[in-house]
Image (cartoon, rainbow, N blue to C red):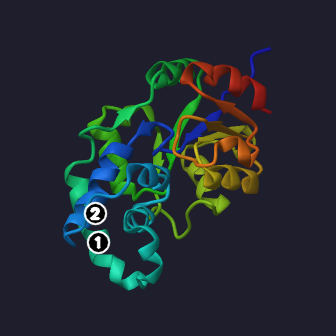
Amino acid sequence: MTRPPLTLVFDLDGTLVDTAPDLIKAANHAMATLGRPPGDPRLLRPAASHGALAMIRAALGPEAATWPEATLYPLFDAFIAHYEANIAIESRPYPGLLAALDRAAAAGHTLAVCTNKREHLAKQLLAELGLSRRFKVVTGRDTFAFYKPDPLHLTETIALAGGDSARAILIGDSATDVATAKAAKIPVIAVGFGYSDPHVSAFDPDAIIEHYDALDAAIAKVRR
């Protein structure tokens, strides 16, 4: 018996696209406005799933704890301005992604994006990478009055895509993604090649893939 199609909801940074190179450059641009040296990529990369302020704090290092949040706003503005102008210089879809999306579409699944990136930046990135047409809906941190890990961000994205939360799966790379899906009582597949430190296995997702070639088998494993 053919099973009904699903709504597959993807996180963006560290899940669909390796955006860390361009995000790190934006963070280092913000540091340059202070006359500071570039941040350590080993510290910046794990922060890439958590937004501009998290990356700025990572670039500042332990000193960030002494900076009131309001003093970070000029750095945030410099980060966003640089990133928006250079959003897809080195960012690339992860290996195997395009073929996996083709297979998912051929199976009749609806594809959507639920990211804590600002919506216009998420749409700009997907457009510049030629990925926009693949996703019915793209929602960001500012689409609603709530965002991940609030489960409403996920369930409202599914609803906008015309889907049913009882037939949906989230694919993400972070503790936030796993927590969001669990709160929404939706299965979650974690990618092990994203930015999470520690490895996503620490957060007990329903399945883990280390390459998009494994996505179909993971969907078959976790779907209801």
The quarter of the picture where residue 68 lies is: bottom left
The percent coordinates of residue 32 (x first, y second) are 20, 65
Residue at (29, 72) in percent of width and height: 75
Residue 222 vs residue 200, the one in the foreground: 200
Residue under circle 2? 79
- Could you tell me if residue 198 is visible in this image? yes
Where is residue 153 drawn, in percent x and y? 59, 58
Determine whether the residue tagged by mark 2 lies in a helix, strand or loop. helix
Residue name at image x 33 percent, y 77 percent = 73
Residue beneath disc 1: 75
Whether 218 is drawn above or below 163: the answer is above
Q: Is residue 3 left or right of residue 26?
A: right
Q: Eyeballing the image, is 100 above or below 140?
A: above
Extreme residue in the top direction: 1
What is the quadrant of residue 169 in the picture? Answer: top right
Which residue type carries mark 2? Phe
The label shown at residue 197 is none
Decide if residue 4 is in sight here.
Answer: no
In-front residue for pair 148/195 = 195
Task: Give percent across and percent down for residue 114.
Answer: 52, 49
